[in-house]
Image (cartoon, rainbow, N blue to C red):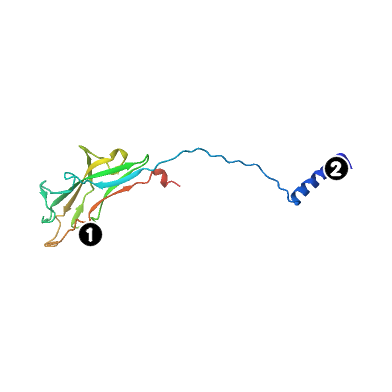
Amino acid sequence: MNKMAKGAIATGLGVILLVGGGGTLATWNLAQNASMGKVVTGDLNLVPSTTTAGQGQWTNAAGTKIDIASYKVVPGDVLIYTQDLNLTISGDLMAAKLAVTGAGINNGFDPATVSVSATTLTKGTQILPGTVLLPADSGTVQASTTFTFNTSTAGRSDVGANYDFSGVGYSLVQQAPASANKS
């Protein structure tokens, strides 16, 4: 046998002894921290004002303050509820919508007899555009919602009807960032 063949046989025998004899063939590996840092979550909050001036008020179409507990509406009447809300909207991609809650058919507000408008938001003297609120809109805003009692009420329908506004309120709902909807 030549030297090459003897070397190959010896090497092969060494490998067989290592594998068969309980030895291991290991690969190298290494793990390191990437020092990615920390992230802090944003906030979304809605709190009705507790100041006397900012508490909810009802007015009729003539702009007169009314007591909702004793006011009697008629077809074509318009009632406006206005209240200050303290909004907290923070987060780099935070966006939210304010909606009226509890003013649906399940609470006696049939669209055939009562129309509920989208809420108008005012910050200071500025009317906030659109329905999407951003972090810059945080702070105290005035929300105004209009309830119109339709003139199309036929005959004596809805005479003596009750409308319970105690369950009507506002909700602030986060809108998912556009990138969250991509797959």
The residue drawn where x is 83% and y is 41% is 7
The percent coordinates of residue 137 (x first, y second) are: 28, 39
Secondary structure category for the residue under label 2: helix
Query: What amino acid type should be assigned to the residue bearing mark 1?
Result: Asn
Circle 1/circle 2 CB separation < 8 Å: no
Q: Is residue 126 above or below residue 181?
A: above
The percent coordinates of residue 37 (x first, y second) are: 46, 38
Secondary structure category for the residue under label 1: helix
Q: Is residue 28 above or below residue 78?
A: above
User: Which residue is nearer to you in this view: 116 or 66?
Assistant: 66
In this picture, residue 126 sits left or right of residue 160? right
- Snapshot quadrant of residue 71: bottom left
Q: Is residue 90 above or below residue 75?
A: above
Quadrant containing the N terminus is: top right
For residue 165, the mark is none
Q: Is residue 108 above or below residue 142?
A: below
What separation in Å lies between label 1 and label 2 (alpha carbons)?
95 Å
User: Which residue is nearer to you in this view: 155 or 162?
Assistant: 162
The percent coordinates of residue 177 (x first, y second) are: 38, 44
The percent coordinates of residue 80 (x first, y second) are: 16, 49
The residue identified by callout 1 is: 107
In this picture, residue 84 sits left or right of residue 12? left
In this picture, residue 90 sits left or right of residue 160? right
Tag in front: 1 or 2: 2
Mark 2 neighbour density, 10 Å: few (under 14) some (14–19) many (20 or more): few
Mark 1 neighbour density, 10 Å: few (under 14) some (14–19) many (20 or more): some
Query: What amino acid type should be assigned to the residue bearing mark 2?
Result: Lys
The residue identified by callout 2 is: 6
Q: Earlier in the sequence, mark 1 or mark 2?
A: 2
